[in-house]
Image (spheres, rainbow, N blue to C red):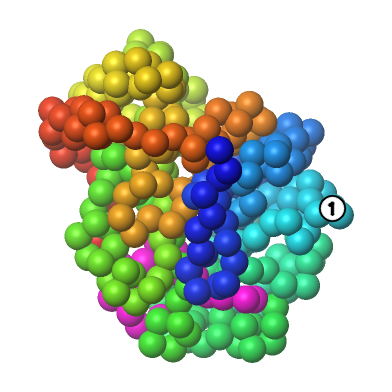
Amino acid sequence: MPVESRKLGTSGCSVAPIALGCYPIAGVTTLGANEADSIATIQACFDLGINHLDTAYVYGEHGESENLIRQAIAGRRDEVVIATKGGIHFESGSMVNDARPETLLRECDESLQRLGTDRVELYYLHSPDRERPIEESAAAIAKLIEQGKVLSAGLSNATPEEMEAFHAVCPLSMVQLPYNMLQRGIEQRTVPWCQENGIGIAVYWALMKGLLAGKLPRDGQLAEGDSRRKYPMFQGEEYRKNLDFVDRLREIAEPVGLSVAQLVVAWTIRQPGITVALCGAKRAYQITETAVAQQVELTPEVLQAIDDALAERGEALTNRQFE
C-alpha cells in the first residue's frame, strides 16, 4: 500500500503523515545517540516513504542534528523536505530564547550551512520571544522568504493569539505544538483556527515522550540523567495512571497485530486538522516500527475501544500554556 501524501501547509510540498523528529539524534541533548546510528536512522526514512525531516538550530549545542542531516542526505537533497527552527540557542550550556530579527537572520544562515543547502522548505520561529513583539520575528522570517532562503513560514510553541499576530505579518504555512491522546488541548481553539486559515499542524510528543510507546517497565525508574523525570506525567500516581492506560491500549493493539506505538501514531495522524506527526528515533528499527502506522486503517470498533479507554483514563495532567 502506498504511503499517503499530504500538503505541508501552503508550502506546495507534499509529505508523508509521519516525519522524522531529529531532536533525539542530536546526542548532546539526549541520551544514547551516536553518529552512525543517527545517520542510519535518517537514511532508513528513504525506504519507509518518510520524506520530511524536522530539526532546529538548537538541536545539539553545536548543531549536531543539522550536521548529521547534511551527511545523511548527501546526494539526495531533492528527495527530502526539511524544516528547521530558529530563535533558541545555547549560551554557556543553557538554552536562551532570542528571536530578535538579527538573530533569526544569522541563525538561518548558519542552519543552511550546517544542512548543506541554500534553502529550507519550512522555517519555524521555535518559540515566541516574550521580551519583544512577535511581529518583529515574523517580519524577519518574511525577509528570509523574500531572500529565497526559506520557502514557507512556521510557528512553534505559540498560543492562538500569537499565531494570529504572526500570521498578520508573515502568512503561516504550519504551526507546531505538543499533541497526543492524553494532551488534546489544541483541539479547542488552535485546530479550528488553523483549519479556517488553511494552515497545517505538525505535532510533537505523539508518543508522550515515549510514555505511550508501551515499552516502559511498570516497576522501572528513569535514569538519573533522563530529562523526562521532571514531567508530572512521569511522576507518582499520574505515572501509574498513564501506565494503566498504556496497558489498555495494548489490549486493543495486539489483537489487530499492532504495537502500542503503532496504534497511538495511527490514531494521531488521523485526527482532524493534523497534517503530520513528528516521531523521534535514535535507531533505524525505531522509525521502521513507527512508520507502519502510516498504512494502518483503524476500524470503527478499534476507534470506539480507544474512546472507551480514554474515557476511563480521564483528564491527564498536561501543559496548558499553548491553549
Whether 187 is among the magenta residues is no
Residue 118 pos. (x, y %): 78, 72
Residue name at image x 52 percent, y 64 percent? 8
162 to 177, vertically: above or below: below
315 to 97, vertically: above or below: above
* Res 27 → quadrant: top right
Residue beneath label 1, please? 74
| Residue 280 visible here | no
Residue name at image x 82 percent, y 49 percent? 71
Residue that lies at the very extreme toward the right in this rendered image: 75
Q: Which quadrant holds the N terminus? A: top right
Residue name at image x 62 percent, y 46 percent? 50
Which SS class for mark 1? loop
In the foreground, 266 or 84: 266
193 to 323, vertically: above or below: below
Residue 30 pos. (x, y %): 58, 38
Residue name at image x 38 percent, y 30 percent? 263
Q: Is residue 29 left or right of residue 73?
A: left
Label 1 amino acid?
Answer: Ala
In the foreground, 223 or 36: 36
Residue 18 pos. (x, y %): 52, 46
* Residues shaded magenta: 150-166
Whether 164 is among the magenta residues is yes
